[in-house]
Image (cartoon, rainbow, N blue to C red):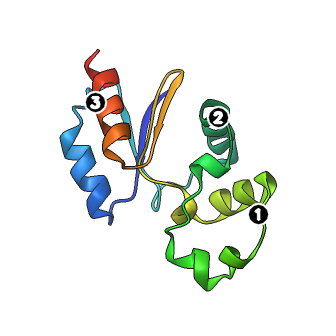
Amino acid sequence: MKTFFYLGTCDTCARIRKELDFGPEIELREIKSQAISEAEVDAMKALAGSYEALFSRRAMKFRSLGLNEQELSEADYRKWITEEYTFLKRPVLILDDQIFVGNTKKVVAAAKAALEG
């Protein structure tokens, strides 16, 4: 699988999308209009090591739903990511057996290096 998961209304995702050079073999998936399947989330987890690594605590709903006051399990992280696109840490780039999650400079640089070569 070679897929870039992003949110169309996210300026950071848009900036990173422009910065990375995607060839025609990379599928671009806007996660609000094309929901992420449970199988896709499970595949992401297999590459990332945990559902927690895929979960965004920056999502506005994190506090409004009181999740910041709860002890979340891996099952909880999976549930929230599959139910609400906003809980996926964005963007996510999958290149076969590699995954790049989030928007830190280090992650973006690693994704760029992997795409180049």
Q: Residues within 10 Å of mark 1 (few under 14, many from 20)?
A: few
The answer for how far apart the CA atoms under marks 2 and 1 are is 20 Å
Q: Left or right of 101: which side holds 63?
A: right
- Of labels 3 and 1, earlier in sequence is 1
The answer for how far apart the CA atoms under marks 3 and 2 are is 21 Å
When asked about the image quadrant of residue 63, the answer is bottom right
Q: Left or right of 80: which side holds 89?
A: left
Q: Mark 1 points at which residue?
A: 72
Q: Nearer the viewer, residue 40 or 115?
A: 115
The residue that appears at 60% across and 66% down in the rendered structure is 84
Could you tell me if the residues under marks 3 and 2 are in contact, i.e. CB atoms within 8 Å?
A: no
User: Where does residue 64 sit, x and y in percent of width and height?
Assistant: 60, 85
Above or below 8: residue 38? above
Say which mark, if any, is on residue 43.
2
When asked about the image quadrant of residue 68, the answer is bottom right
The residue that appears at 26% across and 47% down in the rendered structure is 16
Q: Mark 3 points at which residue?
A: 112
